[in-house]
Image (cartoon, rainbow, N blue to C red):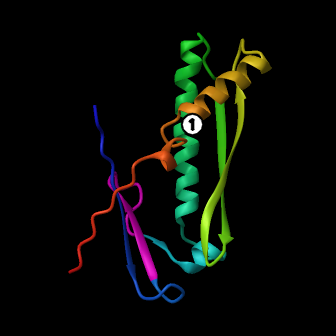
Amino acid sequence: MKINRKGTAVWSGGLKDGKGAITTQSGALKDYPYGFATRFGDVLGTNPEELLGAAHAGCFTMALSLILGEANLKAERMETTATVSLEQKGEGFEVTAVLLNLKAKIPGASQAQFVELANKAKANCPLSKVLRANIALEAVLE
């Protein structure tokens, strides 16, 4: 089975003076603003790193829910924050790390079992694997 989901970004202008908008296929985000100041400053809007963090946190937490179920456990509550680190490397920037910070209440789980299952979810969550994925590009100049 293959599922395709889409996100679209539109950009006009230069790097620092330009403006962009992000839209998700579901409509959860529709023409949501992003730009240099929302990425490198504190202007209201979004940026690719926080979107990646939210997606990774959601994916990881769902994967852990599956793995807990396989171990006959069920979470009362799980909260994951994914901190995506963007660092300048030479002339450009790169994502250098993602820290998944998980707080959970899982009746019947020991700390050791919890850590083991959480690490399994981290290793097997599809978005944990994303940077190893085959990234293709189709570019059309209009």
- Which quarter of the rendered picture does the C terminus lie within? bottom left
Q: Quadrant of residue 93?
A: bottom right
Q: Do we see residue 66 in this rendering?
A: yes
Residue stretch rendered in magenta on the structure = 19-31
Q: Is residue 43 left or right of residue 14?
A: right
Instruction: Compare residues 95 and 132 and report the one nearer the observer.
Output: 132
Q: Is residue 19 left or right of residue 60?
A: left
| Residue 16 covered by magenta stretch | no
Instruction: Compare residues 36 and 30 and report the one nearer the observer.
Output: 36
Residue that numbered label 1 is attached to:
60
Q: Do we see residue 76 in this rendering?
A: no
- Identify whether 50 is placed above or below 16: above
- Identify whether 15 is placed above or below 45: below
Q: Is residue 3 left or right of residue 32?
A: left
Report the residue at 51% width, 41% height from top.
129
Crowd around label 1: few <14 · some 14–19 · many ≥20 (10 Å): many
Expressed as whole percent of the image width and height from the top left, the position of residue 63 reads 53, 30
Tally the marks. 1
Expressed as whole percent of the image width and height from the top left, the position of residue 134 reads 39, 49
- Identify whether 60 is placed above or below 29: above
Expressed as whole percent of the image width and height from the top left, the position of residue 100 reads 68, 43
Report the residue at 66% width, 38% height from top.
79
Q: Is residue 49 left or right of residue 19?
A: right
Q: Residue furthest right?
A: 111
Q: Determine whether the residue tagged by mark 1 lies in a helix, strand or loop.
A: helix
- Which quarter of the rendered picture does the N terminus lie within? top left
The kind of residue tagged 1 is Phe
Report the residue at 56% width, 21% height from top.
67
| Residue 30 covered by magenta stretch | yes
Report the residue at 54% width, 67% height from top.
46
Expressed as whole percent of the image width and height from the top left, the position of residue 140 reads 23, 73
